[in-house]
Image (cartoon, rainbow, N blue to C red):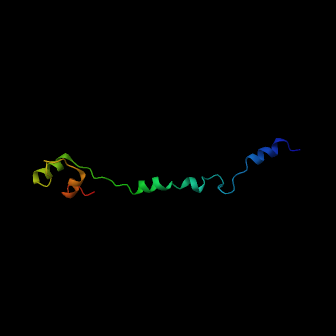
Amino acid sequence: RGGTRLRHFRAKRKNSKTWEHGADPLFKRIPKWPAAHKHMTRKTLEPLNLAKLRMFIEKGRIDTRFTITQRHLYDSRCVSK
């Protein structure tokens, strides 16, 4: 007796470890470890204006004989980050 009624009921039974009454389970709500940590600790670079760069070159803080790198900009205090 019962036919397919009981079979359907058994198929819809929820996993007791992750079932949270319709809400997303906790393991889905928490961001994955490496990606979330890298996103939170990512450096935000400071924008550099060409006029500001020109001013630092004219003051003599940056040497134009060599290629200008981020390290040169940081050492000359043209950018802070």
Residue at the image point whose x is 85% and y is 42% from the top: 3
**With 73 as the anchor, is 59 left or right in this view?**
left
Residue 29 coordinates in the image, percent (x, y): 55, 54
Residue 19 percent coordinates (x, y): 66, 54
Judge from the rendering whether residue 23 lies leftward or rightward of residue 5; answer left or right: left
* Residue at 17%, 49% in the rendered image: 53
Give the number of marks: 0
Residue at the image position 51 percent from the left and 54 percent from the top: 32
Q: Quarter holding the C terminus?
A: bottom left
- Residue 27 % position (x, y): 57, 55
- Quadrant location of the N terminus? top right
Point 20% across, 54% down: residue: 72
Q: Residue furthest front?
A: 66
Q: In the image shown, does 54 or 64 lie closer to the viewer?
A: 64
Q: Quadrant of residue 25?
A: bottom right
Q: Residue furthest right?
A: 1
Q: Say which quarter of the image contains residue 26.
A: bottom right
Residue in front for this viewpoint, 15 or 33: 33
Of residues 15 and 2, the one nearer the viewer is 15
